[in-house]
Image: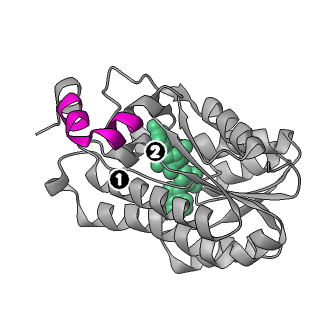
Amino acid sequence: MSTPAGGTAVVTGGSSGIGAALALRLAAAGWDVVVSGRDRTRLAAVAAACGGTAVEADLARPDGVEAVRSAAEGRVRLLVHGAGLGWAGPVADTPPDAVSAMLAVNLDAPIRLTNALLPTLRDQDGHVVFVASVAAIGVAGEAVYSATKAGLRGFADAVRLESGVRVTTVLPGAVDTPYFARRGTPYHRRFPRPVSADRVAAAVVDSVGRDRAEVFVPRWLTLGARVHGAVPATFARLSRRFDPPAR
Ligand SMILES: NC(=O)c1ccc[n+]([C@@H]2O[C@H](COP(=O)([O-])OP(=O)(O)OC[C@H]3O[C@@H](n4cnc5c(N)ncnc54)[C@H](OP(=O)(O)O)[C@@H]3O)[C@@H](O)[C@H]2O)c1
């Protein structure tokens, strides 16, 4: 069964990039949008542009998770976990603070919010979207980020099986957003070329409408995931050859 537009959509990470583009698309499709993020100015601008509501919340903190939970409880029908951050470099050099922040925002907060909001989502015949990443299949130089996104994908798969709520996992490749500037390391790969945030947003809206379980953006990245799933050693050999790890 598909999820028709309408009702309240809560988008974390709504102050920038993919979340901001998605908030606009959801509003245009007929959703009442609630956006959350930390940057008050950008958040207010997105909320105004989509005629929605802003919830200022730091999802690395329990009070931030609580603020989003309380704004969503009793009304959320579409919950989009868009907030996230990365760090790039050799795994052994990953600063402990970056490990903690990625685990908290990319994985812990979506798990806690989903758990707390499942009763509402069931009442609303609702849908949850997890913005993971193609890094969920493991990317050199992004080990901890990959781990958080693989964890998110596994959590989404289990929730889809057991909860009675529709679940979509979105796995973008590189997306042209402030993400790379914020993590402090520019995007360096020749392929895949970055796609626009709006292209990811369009794929999310389409996937929710069709109740798709998973979508890679761009779609051809599905092929890499299939090779990884079927022959992981071959996938690793090819990855090392075409995308040598930084040392
Ligand atoms: N860009 C890519 O190439 C790419 C590829 C695959 C997956 N993704 C995933 O897509 C999602 C959106 O990323 P993006 O590319 O749109 O990057 P972005 O423009 O940097 O947006 C990240 C969003 O996450 C929010 N956020 C970060 N830390 C937070 C915290 N502690 N508490 C609350 N919100 C926090 C930011 O809010 P504030 O700015 O208000 O702090 C912002 O709204 C992330 O989950 C990312 O992992 C991105």
Mark 2 close to ligand 1, CB under 8 Å: yes
Residue type marked 2 = Ser
Please tell me which of labels 2 and 1 falls first in the chain. 2
Residue 196 x/y as whole percent: 57, 28
> Taking 163 as reference, is 102 left or right?
left
Relative to 67, residue 195 above or below? above
In terms of image quadrants, where is residue 144? Answer: bottom left
> Taking 137 as reference, is 111 left or right?
right
Of 207 and 45, nearer the camera is 207
Residue 128 x/y as whole percent: 67, 59
In terms of image quadrants, where is residue 101? Answer: bottom left
Mark 1 close to ligand 1, CB under 8 Å: yes
Query: At numbered mark 1, what does the secondary structure look like: helix, strand or loop?
Result: helix
Residue type marked 1 = Tyr
Of 121 and 58, nearer the camera is 121
- The residue positioned farthest toward the left in the image shown: 247
Residue 226 belongs to the span the image colors magenta: yes
Residue 90 x/y as whole percent: 17, 48
Task: Tally the marks.
Answer: 2
The residue that disc 1 covers is 145
Residue at x 40% of width, y 55% of height: 150
Q: Main secondary structure of the magenta part?
A: helix
Structural distance between the alpha carbons of marks 2 and 1: 9 Å
> Taking 165 as reference, is 214 left or right?
left
| Residue 117 can be seen, yes or no | yes
Q: Are marks 2 and 1 in contact (CB under 8 Å)?
A: yes
Relative to 141, residue 148 above or below? below
What's the colour scheme? one colour
Residue at x 33% of width, y 40% of height: 230
What's drawn in magenta, residue-wise?
A: 225-238
Residue 22 x/y as whole percent: 69, 42
